[in-house]
Structure formats: C-alpha cells, structure tokens
Image (spheres, rainbow, N blue to C red):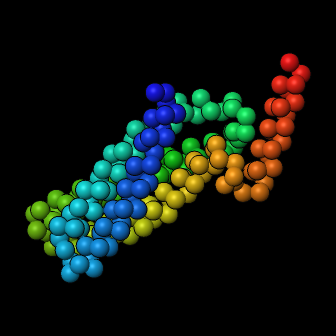
C-alpha cells in the first residue's frame, strides 16, 4: 500500500468519529444523563484525535502521488492541506478536552458538568470543520462534487493534458 492508500483509509476515522462521538454525547444527555454513554463519547473523541495524526501525516505522500494526475487541481490540494492542519489542531484539542473530562469525571470533580458542555461545544465546531475538510478532500479527485469555477479550471486542465498526449 502506498501513502495515498493509507491516507484514504485513515482520513475517514477522525471525521466519522467526531460526528459519531457528538451523537453519542447527545444520546448520553437524552438518556437521563447516562454517564456510561457520555464516557463512551469521550473515548470516541480521544480515538478520533489519535487517528487524525496518521491521517494528516500520510497526506503529504498522497499529495505527491496525485498532484500530477490529470484533473487534479493544485489549488484544491493546498486548500485541503490547510483545512487538514486546522482540523488536526481542533480535533487534538477536542481529544485533550475529552481526556481532561474523563479524568475529572473519574475524580468526581465539580467541574465535570462544565467540561462536558465545553466538550460538546468544541465537538460541534469540530464536526463543521470535519465536513469542510472531508468535502474538500473529496474534491481533489471527484470532479463531480466541485463547485462551478473549480470544475471549469479542471476541464481546462484535462483538455490541456489531452492535447499534450496527442502531441506525443
């Protein structure tokens, strides 16, 4: 497996994990403030943060493999890379908050309730960023989901590439 395979395999875990963790945390509140369910959400957030590290680290190798392919737009890759950096930072903050909340819960601290609210708020923001980084990452190779201006740029790139092949 090459870096692109690893990136594609790993990049879904922190995105889906963040959304799933947020839904589990909401469920924990809806189920009569169920502590076990809320602790499960904290575990999911921690796992998501840990999986974001290799997902991010495999991105550079994946970029090197796809940047010269027909239809791949360097601008989209750069935006995805920037969003990936922001997502990594935010999801690591979420994971750290989840760990602090877990410890606070274990120690039966009075701050636990406030920490859960903070985790929930950060998880909502992380979900929004996860959606953006995931959609933008998909646009690298999936021209059908790109917005109008970028699609036109890619069509021009594809036509130029096809013209260059004819010259050979």
Q: Is residue 20 above or below residue 2?
A: below
Q: Using the image as rendered, state which of residue 111 and residue 91 is in the foreground.
A: 91
Rendered location of residue 31, percent (x, y): 23, 78
Q: Is residue 102 above or below residue 138?
A: below
Rendered location of residue 94, percent (x, y): 35, 57
Q: Is residue 107 above or below residue 34?
A: above
Rendered location of residue 25, percent (x, y): 30, 69
Rendered location of residue 134, percent (x, y): 53, 52
* Residue 11 showing in the rendered view: yes
Q: Using the image as rendered, state which of residue 72 and residue 88 is in the foreground.
A: 72
* Residue 56 showing in the rendered view: no
Q: Residue furthest top?
A: 168
Quadrant of the rendered structure where residue 111 is? bottom left
Q: Using the image as rendered, state which of residue 84 and residue 112 is in the foreground.
A: 84
In the image, 100: left or right of 133? left
Q: Residue at x 21, y 63 (%)?
A: 39
In the image, 52: left or right of 5? left
Q: Using the image as rendered, state which of residue 109 and residue 32 is in the foreground.
A: 32
Q: Residue at x 46, y 27 (%)?
A: 1
Q: Which quarter of the image is occupied by the C terminus?
A: top right
């Amino acid at each position: 497996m090459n870096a692109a395979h690893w990136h594609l395999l790993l990049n879904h875990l922190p995105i889906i994990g963040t959304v799933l963790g947020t839904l589990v945390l909401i469920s924990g509140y809806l189920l009569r403030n169920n502590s076990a369910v809320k602790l499960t959400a904290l575990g999911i957030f921690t796992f998501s943060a840990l999986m974001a590290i290799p997902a991010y680290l495999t991105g550079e190798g994946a970029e090197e493999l796809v940047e010269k392919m027909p239809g791949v737009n360097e601008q989209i890759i750069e935006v995805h890379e920037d969003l990936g950096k922001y997502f990594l930072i935010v999801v690591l903050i979420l994971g750290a908050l989840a760990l602090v909340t877990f410890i606070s819960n274990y120690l039966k601290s009075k701050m636990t309730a406030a920490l859960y609210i903070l985790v929930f708020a950060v998880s909502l923001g992380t979900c929004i960023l996860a959606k953006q980084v995931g959609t933008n990452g998909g646009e690298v190779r999936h021209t059908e989901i790109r917005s109008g201006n970028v699609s036109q740029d890619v069509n021009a790139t594809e036509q130029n590439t096809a013209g260059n092949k004819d010259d050979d």
